[in-house]
Image (cartoon, grey):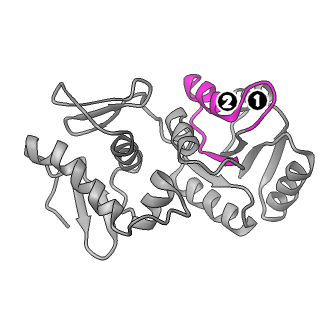
Amino acid sequence: MKVLVVEDEPKMRALLERGLAEAGYRVQAVEDGPSAVTEATREAFDVVVLDVMLPGMDGFDVVAALRKQEVWAPVLMLTARDAVADRVAGLDAGADDYLVKPFAFTELLSRLRALLRRGAPRRPAVLTCGPVELDPATRVVTCRGEVIDLSAREFALLEFLLRRSGQVLSRAQIIEHVWDYHYDGFSNVVDVYVKYLRDKLDRPYGLDLIQTVRGAGYRLACRGGPPA
């Protein structure tokens, strides 16, 4: 498996190169945004490990440029900025996962394995699920052509579910990506926001898209089917 590492800090870049090589990956490393775009469009990589803060162009711009040029390799973004807005911006740009520094290298390897199992499917500009369409660029959600008014958090939750359509997502996974890994608010926040989405999408339009998987979490069932 071939990995492109994009990291401008020399010590971190060397750590990533050495650790990934020891784990059996073939590693190529660059230190700035423009070089990342050049290499990723010239060669085929199985996965990209991409820092957010880069010279030339930041990680958000890099991943957006790659998707625009139809480079669909999974992207794991690394950043020291532990903010929900940054996570959402990375996912909106086309990243697949987000890891906050400092991190355990074992977790990095685990996330890379998960991305590699999913492969590199083409990512449409507009995310769809049945009659529901979500445009990350314009931040507009429609159902059967009607615009649905969502709060910023409802939009982020729906986008996360859409990007992982068909997968069973635990409440912890949802909190990590839509709120924050260290979120310490009320414990049933995911259930509350799922209800908000159901009230705006499922119930008014007679849909059953957001399904509860008992004891596990939630799943977006875009092809229909009975509730779990």
Q: Which residue is mark 2?
A: 62
Q: Which mark is residue 33?
A: 1
Name the residue nearer the viewer: 168 or 99: 99
Q: Does label 1 or label 2 sit earlier along the sequence?
A: 1
Q: Residues within 10 Å of mark 1 (few under 14, many from 20)?
A: many
Query: Can you name the residue that lies furthest to the front here?
Result: 185
| Location of residue 3 with respect to 132 vertically, above or below | below
Q: Residue at x 16, y 56 (%)?
A: 225
The image shows residue 138 at horizontal and vertical percentages of 40, 23
Query: Can you name the residue that lies furthest to the bottom here?
Result: 215
- Magenta-tinted stretch: 53-79
The image shows residue 52 at horizontal and vertical percentages of 70, 39
- Looking at numbered disc 1 in the image, what kind of residue is underneath it? Gly
The image shows residue 55 at horizontal and vertical percentages of 81, 29
Q: Quadrant of residue 217?
A: bottom left
- Give the position of the C terminus as an image quadrant: bottom left
Residue 132 in view here: yes
Is residue 171 located in the magenta-colored stretch of the structure? no
Q: Is residue 41 left or right of residue 213?
A: right
Kindly state the secondary structure of the residue where label 1 is placed: helix
Q: Which mark is residue 172?
A: none
Q: Is residue 77 left or right of residue 182?
A: right
Is residue 67 located in the magenta-colored stretch of the structure? yes
Q: Is residue 85 left or right of residue 7?
A: left
Q: CA distance from mark 1 to mark 2?
A: 6 Å
Q: Residue at x 56, y 64 (%)?
A: 182
Name the residue nearer the viewer: 78 or 70: 78
Residue 209 in view here: no
Question: Marks 1 and 2: CB-CB under 8 Å?
Answer: yes
Kindly state the secondary structure of the residue where label 2 is placed: helix
Q: Residues within 10 Å of mark 2 (few under 14, many from 20)?
A: many
